[in-house]
Amino acid sequence: MTVAASATTALLFGGMVLSSFSSAAVLLTPLPATVTEPTIRRAFAHFYLYGISTAVVAALLI
C-alpha cells in the first residue's frame, strides 16, 4: 500500500512539474496575447482535474 501511495504521489508531482514547465513553454511562446487566455483556461482545467484526482487517490492510499 505504501508503494502505491508513493507511486501515486510521484505521478502527482511529476504531472505538476511537467505541466507547469512544458505547458508554459509550449503554449505561451508561439501564441499571440489574444489567443493565450482562452487556451490557458482550456488547458489548465484538465490539469486541475488530473491534480485533484491524483491527490485524492494518493490520500486514500496513505
Image (cartoon, grey):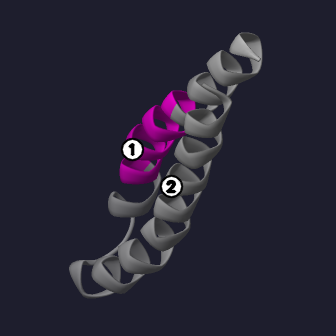
Q: Main secondary structure of the magenta part?
A: helix
Query: Which residue is denoted by mark 2 in the rendering?
Result: 52
Please state the extent of the stretch shown in magenta in the rendering: 13-25
Q: Is residue 4 left or right of residue 30?
A: right
- What is the three-letter code of the residue carrying label 2? Ile
Residue at (47, 43) in percent of width and height: 22
Q: Residues within 10 Å of mark 1 (few under 14, many from 20)?
A: few
Cα distance between the residues tagged 2 and 1: 15 Å
Residue nearest the observer in this picture, 28 or 6: 6
Residue at (38, 78) in percent of width and height: 41
Looking at the image, is 6 positioned above or below residue 39? above
Residue nearest the observer in this picture, 45 or 6: 6
Residue at (51, 59) in percent of width and height: 47
State the quadrant of the C terminus: top right
Q: Is residue 27 left or right of residue 3?
A: left
Residue sticking out furthest to the left = 33
Q: Residues within 10 Å of mark 2 (few under 14, many from 20)?
A: few
Query: Which residue is denoted by mark 1 in the rendering?
Result: 20
- What is the three-letter code of the residue carrying label 1? Ser
Q: Is residue 2 left or right of residue 53?
A: right
Point out the tag, 2 or 1, that comes first from the N-terminus: 1
Looking at the image, is 46 positioned above or below residue 59? below
The quadrant where residue 49 appears:
bottom right
Q: Position of residue 39 (x, y in %)?
A: 42, 78
Looking at the image, is 29 positioned above or below residue 12? below
50 part of magenta stretch: no
Q: Position of residue 27 (x, y in %)?
A: 43, 61
State the quadrant of the N terminus: top right
